[in-house]
Amino acid sequence: MEDRTAALAAPDRKNASDRALSIAWFLIMLTGWSIVATLLVASPDTADRFWHWSRNLPMWQQVIEWIILLPWMVGLAIWQSDWATNVRVAAVTLVALAWIVASKP
């Protein structure tokens, strides 16, 4: 009977850890996009400097940076494009919302 109880409890622990990871990932996405939005509104020059700094890194470092910061780098890449400001704002907003919704636990 004890083995059966332990076997039944194991999926609960796995589900709890999966849920915790999902919530953590969601909070990371939400925090990251909040930082990007604040940066673009409050200090677009800082966002520009970060973009140019990251573009001047060696290629292998840029690859690592893009892997780690992919959603936010996509947002910055859109922001750095030559599109009209309202189109860039809409595109970055859509990308941010898509990542946040996809990350929702």
Image (cartoon, grey):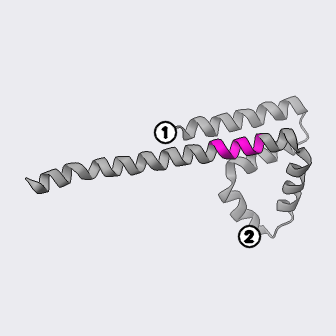
Frontmost residue, 34 versus 83? 34
Assess disc 2: are there few (<14), some (14-19) or many (≥20) residues with their C-alpha within 10 Å of its C-alpha: few
- The residue carrying pointer 1 sits among few (fewer than 14), some (14 to 19) or many (20 or more) residues within 10 Å by Cα, namely some
Q: Residue at x 86, y 61 (%)?
A: 53
The residue under the point 74% across, 47% down is 74
Q: Is residue 53 left or right of residue 103?
A: right
From the viewer's side, name the closer residue of 45 and 64. Answer: 45
Estimate the x, y position of residue 21 in percent, counting from the top left.
48, 50
Left or right: 16, with 40 as reference point: left
Location of residue 39 by image quarter: top right
Give the tally of numbered discs: 2
32 in the magenta segment? yes
Residue for badge 1: 105
Determine which quarter of the picture holds residue 27: top right
Q: Which SS type dominates the magenta stretch?
A: helix
For badge 1, the amino acid type reads Pro
Task: Tell me where residue 89 appears, x and y as whole percent.
Answer: 82, 33
Seen from the viewer's position, the closer of residues 96 and 45 is 45
- Mark 2 and mark 1: Cα distance apart in space: 32 Å
Amino acid at dot 2: Trp
Tag of residue 47: none
Instruction: Give the label, 2 or 1, closer to the camera.
Output: 1
Q: Which residues are magenta?
A: 30-37
User: Which residue matches tag 2?
Assistant: 60
Question: Is 103 drawn above or below residue 70 in the view shown?
Answer: above
* Residue 16 as seen in the image, left or right of residue 83: left
Q: Earlier in the sequence, mark 2 or mark 1?
A: 2
